[in-house]
Amino acid sequence: MRFTICNVGLTFGAVVAASGAAPAPAAPQATPVALVGARIHTAAGPAIENGTIVFADGVITALGAGVAPPVGADVVDLSGMVVMPGMLDNHSHIGADSRDLNEFPVRFGPQHRIRDVLSPDDEFWKGAVKGGVTTVITGPGSGEVSSGQAIVIKTWGESIDERVVKERGGLKIAMGRKRPDQSPTTSMAVTAMLRAKFIEAQEYQARWDAWEEGGQEGPAPPRDLAMEAVVRVLTGEDRIRAHVHQAHDILAIIRLSQEFDFSLAIHHSTEAYKVADDIAEAAIDVIGMPLFTRIALADEVMATGTLMNEKGVRFTFHTDDPVVGSKWQRGNAGLGMRYGMSEQDALEAVTINPAAIAGVEDRVGSLEVGKDADIVVLNGTWYEVSTLVTRVYVNGMVAYDREGEGS
Amino acid sequence: MSRRARIGAVGVAVLAMAALDGGRADVQAQAVALTGGLVYPISSEPVAGGTVLFVDGRIAAVGVDVDIPAGAEVVDVTGSVVMPGIIDAMSYYGIAGEDMNEVPSPLTPELRIIEAFAPFGTFGSGEAGEIRVRELLSGGVTATYIGPGDATVVGGQGAVVKTAGARFDDLIVREPAAIDITLGGRPASTYREQSRSPSTRMAVVAQLRDLLVRAQEWLAGSESGSGDEGAAGGAAAAPRNLGMEALARMLRGEIPARVQANATRDIRVAIELAEEFGFELVIDAGAGAHQMRDELADRGIPVVLGPISHPYISGEEIPDPGDYGGVDERNAVWLNEAGVHISLASFSRGFGRFGPGVAGQWLLIDASIARGHGMSEADVLRAVTLSPAEVLGVADRLGSLEVGKDADVVVFDGDPLSIRTWATQVYVGGRLVYEREN
């Protein structure tokens, strides 16, 4: 048996085949499925003991302690198991080759779209699926002042196009110092460039408005894909996702958001704890550092979630995969609890909060009737990393089953 | 205003974090008895309601019926778990990034990591952060192996150090403790970028083999009359060669070779070289080691594994699937089942640094993943205490709660494998070096 593993491991394709990720079926099954007997963390209310979840055609149709499985349903006994919503990761780089994440020579490139480089290959996504992360906001990197547009997408499904939950996943900008070989290099210059670009976008839009108001007389103004992306932020069709570590840069991007009236979520947010009141007053969203294992962070940073919850700020963790592997998003929540978050707050920080921040809470992020049947089954306490994810449903279909894995 | 005050307070906390806290040798003379805890000696079965007594920095007694000497400080730790300090079998704790690799030369056995070890940091350098030990101690880590980086082929000599002590010399447990060698794609890529040799795996191995041949010759020469006795007899003494002296220690079996190898082909080369030159081999990182577990078990070759959540792949942030198809979270579990001697290590680059390993403070939490995959609690805890002590050659002093060993003791406020559990007291050499109020 061990020889088998040895042989399988040497052939990468064979490993993929043995990884337990199930092939995507053509359509969600019409026969209802009823998961019964588990402890259910819905993220929409208190945990339900010995609960039942029914779903059909990829959507949750009934949920509760006293729900009887419908006649003809496939009943899955999950006694002793724990169920939680498919998790979200609001800041990820999965789905693309890492060499395609940063167009360094273009310092301001909002026209770049992560969607254009996403691979349907299972290899890019299976880590997230196996960890119970079923929706990610994946986007370009942080080397430029703006690296482009992110997308909200499920981690498993028939095709990239069908997996898209929301096209507008946020326009990425990166605050703070940059590489010294090309301006802007200082935080000052980065902020100044952003201000100039927002003004340019206002002027760009004004030209189009004038042309429209003038009855579209004469040639239309030339289109500018970069400016169109910025205009979408100014009109509220998209929002800014700002890579920002230092407190002064957090304050700078808050100032810009007020000056140009755009919706803002700050990412990484390392020194958010130093400006928590400013963040609360500005009512922006905070995507906190990946806590699980890779970077030794100060206690104050580790406790960011606790502080943000106290201040009434909407908070979520991210993995920044490949900084931390997608599958350890649960570990972020567990460490958040270690540093003072309540279990419910920690749960919401990896489920409904990132869904709301991404603007997709009508479909994912909690287990409620009418929402997508994105469901994670575990064999113990959900926030312990010694607990295993045993099965993952996406759109009501089995996307991962641990029993299919080689040993 | 309150914001500024908070920032100021954080700054003060950083400065207070140096590993050395001045001479307080008097504290060591005190007897301390930790009573009422669930004691995991590691070398023997757990003891409920046990007492751990230490005197003059060493363990004096462990058990339920312990006579506590008059004047001893008695600390009631009922409801807590008492364990030996966690030992991180591989990290770069206290080593500045620019001091990790002597890149201009691929073969530098003469280098000693202890000479770059800066547990007190450099004030104002911006590097002070990386020597913070409060976080490390909060995870119960009391000792670690440190070694040169893995960008070159033979990095030099590693050491075993403690994470806290009254004086610099108190931190050093064993030096040199091993020769650090790296196989695989990492050293080759270092020199390929510079259009220099060794730029392929072949050349890496050829240069290493050639160096070991020179060391064999040097050792033979130094043992055949031109050494100390020969000098006394009038023959000219062989000129000293510090690199060869270090390798001679390895070839004589005084210290092992720590060979970082992930892919099966690199592990195979390491085994072949160990056979050929007769040195004691420890495989480092070993992301694909489970694929060779029976051979490793048969030959009694220990493995110091990289983190379970994020396997350490030779300095590359993202594993190259073509090279490391065998990466699997169950690596440690499978090796352990096959009877391979395993230690779990962080490969941490220190505080505030993103590296391919994990932060040392989370070593135990990372290890808990192995528990989830079926490794027994006892085996998981051994892999971060007594097993690393054995592989580092310091089991006479560290790794378990046994009479006579150093009083490096951690008190946890619950299940040591829970993500929510904290070290509440950490003793190193019998001195309380970390305390957390819950």
Image (cartoon, rainbow, N blue to C red):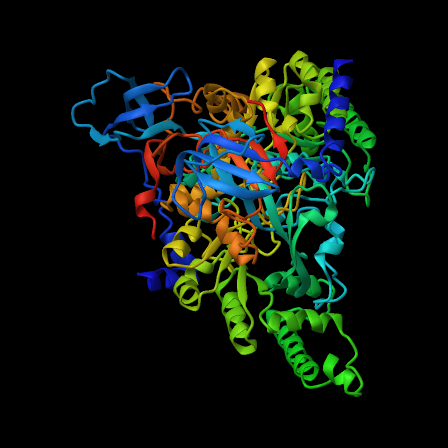
- Depth check: give the residue in front, B112 or A356: B112
* Residue situated furthest left in the rendering: A71
Q: Residue A48 sits in which quadrant?
A: top left
Quick check: A222 above or below B102?
A: above
Q: Quadrant of the C terminus of chain B?
A: top right
Please state the horizontal and vertical placement of residue A10, each as a whole percent of the image.
43, 63
- Depth check: give the residue in front, A43 or A374: A43
Does residue B227 show up? Answer: no
Please state the horizontal and vertical placement of residue A389, each as a whole percent of the image.
38, 37
Does residue B360 show up? Answer: yes
- Depth check: give the residue in front, A173 or B148: B148
Q: Quadrant of the N terminus of chain B?
A: top right
- Depth check: give the residue in front, B335 or B328: B335
Quick check: A79 above or below B117?
A: above
Q: Relative to residue B194, is residue B284 drawn left or right?
A: left
Quick check: B153 above or below A260?
A: below
Q: Give the number of marks.
A: 0
Please state the horizontal and vertical placement of residue B379, each as a whole percent of the image.
41, 48
Please state the horizontal and vertical placement of residue B286, each as a whole percent of the image.
51, 58
* Residue situated furthest front in the rendering: B70
Tell me what residue is drawn at x 82 percent, y 40 percent: B125
Quick check: B388 above or below A284?
A: below
Q: Relative to residue A62, is residue B291 drawn left or right?
A: right
Tell me what residue is drawn at x 74 percent, y 79 percent: B228
Q: Relative to residue B433, is residue A108 drawn left or right?
A: right
